[in-house]
Image: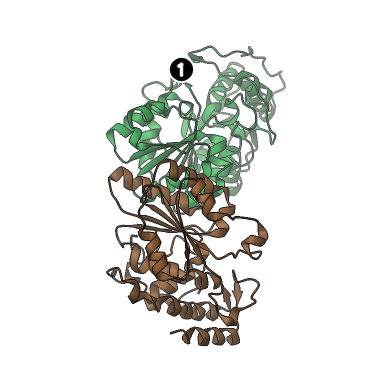
Chain colours: A brown, B green
């Protein structure tokens, strides 16, 4: 990941990758921060930080090497989760975070070309894996062993481009390419499984020639371990998550994809999350 | 500057030029989608296989990969037919390439009705689609020397480029004094009661129509526009000032391409000059040979003459032209 050129004044010096033990509180802290960010606007993409807090913490905190590796955020409405995690890891300036969602801010609520902290954002879904392949090919041409990490989501498997890219990457044996899929079973119209059948996800990727590992997406050590697995083929980490992160406050929520959050809900969520620290 | 018609042709000038450039510069990469020989990139594949990537029939992924390669500092040339370069992956071109302003060179072969394959293979809306995207440069050249030159001319342009190219045999229309200039429309004939503004494969019929009109005492100006976007509006406005009318000529739908671009310029300048757009008239074509399609769908010298006669109020009958019905290898005869 190249730390953003455009927003250099707003990001901190990339830290030494942290150990998993150093990261245990980061997902919860990031969720509290995201509740503040989205709560300030009254609505937004909040379910994504509940499902992906651990995944992004491991990727940004311990795996992606700043200045060496590339990080593509394919579903860029996850960007609020990215901001929150990056801020907790000390990668994003607090002053910039205060502008989140405000007209004219570089911190837009859906990631864009202005977004710091990521190498490519794709608001139109399922375009990120192809871009990641481009990075991986460029590394191969340059003789570099840098990693390319693409963060993706289960809903994106509904788009045909995902499978065009999957075929290509396996055919070319792009072993330095890793896709991490947040399988939170959540899309705009409800659970992914109610809209169409994307399962069996692991079998699908294996059938396409990928090294596929399924993990509990809320388990930091399990995610890191899967990322460290050795493979000559491209790897996909299928991270099983929930868009409510087991929070009682959100139990029974129909649509965690885009949440309206009033002062009451904001307080309840913050309190319940604080209790986890 | 212009050679006389019929024109000799050159075979595969694009493929040769791209390979020559890539042999000099190691930042050039070549991508395609199962149309390697058809896009003249077999030479590149055979000579520089480590920089050649065949996506297969998967244009969405093709364009996305090019975006990643470009963001990593390389100069990807993406080669396929125009229809597959623009219609099929439009969202990918818009969001992964044009919006981030990446230096991807999208090369679309078989423009307009140059393909005998019918609507699935005839790129009649590619200019409209690409012209609508911010940051995109849109180029539609006519002549073989331009095809050779344009590869080097666009490689270091800022942002993405859409280049539409005829396949295979390309006419040599300009002599050696001509130099392609991507910043200017070329005024071939400054004076005229009417002015033809032509791009791409319609330059040859436009030259022929202008000559025939002159033989019948009607002077027509001629402006050649190899770059449809950004359009050299100043040259066009200067050329048409005081004329009785403007005729645009494009191997493309009259909606969204050169005709629309010129209409916008004329209207916004308040020029008050009448405009006729010669091109595909908001319809899908059929399969057929180039002479047949260009004649039947109004992309001909004859059609241009009809419009010139109308704009100048000429009451004499529009001259009949010898019909071009077959294509001779090595020769390009304007229809």
> In the image shown, does A42 or A167 lie closer to the viewer?
A167
Q: Where is residue B309 in the image (x, y as percent from the top left)?
A: 67, 25
Q: Quadrant of residue A84?
A: bottom left
Residue at (41, 24) in percent of width and height: B13
Residue B81 relative to residue A135: left or right: right
Q: B175 and A30: which one is in front?
A: A30
Q: Split into 4 quadrants, where in the image is the C terminus of chain A?
A: bottom left
Element at label 1: strand
Relative height, residue A161 to residue B243 (above, below) = below
The picture places residue B19, in percent across and down from the top left corner, at 35, 30
Q: Say whether residue A67 is visible.
A: yes
Q: Mark 1 lies on which chain?
A: B
Give how far across and how far down residue A72 sits, in percent.
Answer: 43, 58
How many marks on residues? 1
Quarter of the picture holding the N terminus of chain A: bottom left
Q: Where is residue B115 in the image (x, y as percent from the top left)?
A: 58, 26
- In the depicted view, which residue is nearer to us: B75 or B318? B75
Mark 1 neighbour class, 10 Å CA radius: few under 14, some 14 to 19, many 20 or more: some
Pointer 1 residue: B9
Left or right of B112: which side holds B30? left
- Between B218 and B152, the residue placed more toward the observer is B152
Judge whether residue B93 can be spotted in this image. no
């Amino acid at each position: 990941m190249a730390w953003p050129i455009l927003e250099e004044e707003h990001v901190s010096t990339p830290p030494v990758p942290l150990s998993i033990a150093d990261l245990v509180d980061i997902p919860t802290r990031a969720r509290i921060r995201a509740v503040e960010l989205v709560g300030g606007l009254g609505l937004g993409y909040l379910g994504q930080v509940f499902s992906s807090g651990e995944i992004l913490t491991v990727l940004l905190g311990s795996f992606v090497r700043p200045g060496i590796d590339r990080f593509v955020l394919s579903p860029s409405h996850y960007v609020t989760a990215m901001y929150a995690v990056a801020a907790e890891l000390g990668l994003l300036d607090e002053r910039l975070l205060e502008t989140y969602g405000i007209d004219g801010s570089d911190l837009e609520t859906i990631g864009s070309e202005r977004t710091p902290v990521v190498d490519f954002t794709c608001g139109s879904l399922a375009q990120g894996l192809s871009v990641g392949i481009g990075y991986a090919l460029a590394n191969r041409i340059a003789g570099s062993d840098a990693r390319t990490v693409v963060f993706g989501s289960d809903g994106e498997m509904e788009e045909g481009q995902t499978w065009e890219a999957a075929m290509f990457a396996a055919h070319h044996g792009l072993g330095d390419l890793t896709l991490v899929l947040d399988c939170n079973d959540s899309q705009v119209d409800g659970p992914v499984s109610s809209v169409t059948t994307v399962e069996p996800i692991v079998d699908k990727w294996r059938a396409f020639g990928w090294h596929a590992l399924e993990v509990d997406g809320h388990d930091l050590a399990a995610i890191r371990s899967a990322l460290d697995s050795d493979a000559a083929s491209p790897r996909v980490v299928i991270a099983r998550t929930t868009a409510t992160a087991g929070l009682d406050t959100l139990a029974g929520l129909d649509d965690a994809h885009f949440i309206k959050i009033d002062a009451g809900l904001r307080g309840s969520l913050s309190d319940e999350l604080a209790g986890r620290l | 500057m212009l050679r006389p018609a019929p024109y000799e042709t050159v075979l595969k000038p694009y493929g040769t030029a791209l390979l020559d450039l890539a042999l000099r510069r190691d930042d050039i990469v070549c991508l395609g989608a199962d149309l390697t020989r058809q896009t003249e990139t077999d030479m590149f594949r055979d000579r520089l296989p480590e920089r050649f990537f065949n996506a297969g029939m998967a244009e969405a992924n093709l364009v996305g990969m090019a975006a990643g390669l470009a963001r990593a500092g390389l100069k990807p040339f993406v080669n396929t037919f125009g229809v597959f370069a623009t219609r099929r992956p439009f969202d990918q071109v818009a969001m992964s390439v044009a919006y981030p302003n990446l230096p991807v060179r999208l090369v679309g072969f078989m423009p307009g009705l140059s393909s005998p394959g019918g609507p699935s293979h005839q790129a009649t809306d590619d200019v409209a689609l690409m012209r609508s995207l911010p940051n995109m440069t849109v180029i539609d050249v006519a002549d073989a020397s331009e095809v050779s030159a344009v590869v080097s001319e666009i490689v270091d342009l800022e942002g993405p480029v859409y280049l539409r190219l005829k396949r295979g045999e390309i006419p040599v229309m300009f002599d050696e004094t001509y130099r392609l200039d991507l910043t200017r429309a070329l005024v071939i004939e400054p004076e005229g009661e009417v002015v033809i503004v032509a791009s791409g494969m319609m330059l040859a019929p436009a030259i022929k129509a202008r000559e025939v009109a002159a033989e019948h005492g009607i002077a027509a100006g001629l402006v050649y526009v190899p770059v449809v976007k950004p359009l050299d509006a100043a040259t066009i406005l200067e050329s048409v000032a005081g004329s009785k009318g403007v005729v645009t000529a494009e191997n493309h739908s009259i909606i969204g391409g050169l005709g629309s671009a010129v209409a916008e310029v004329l209207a916004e300048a308040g020029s008050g000059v009448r405009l006729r757009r010669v091109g595909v008239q908001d319809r899908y074509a059929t399969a057929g040979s180039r002479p047949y399609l260009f004649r039947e769908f109004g992309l001909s010298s004859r059609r241009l003459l009809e419009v010139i006669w109308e704009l100048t109020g000429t009451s004499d009958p529009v001259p009949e032209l010898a019909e071009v019905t077959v294509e001779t290898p090595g020769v390009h005869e304007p229809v």
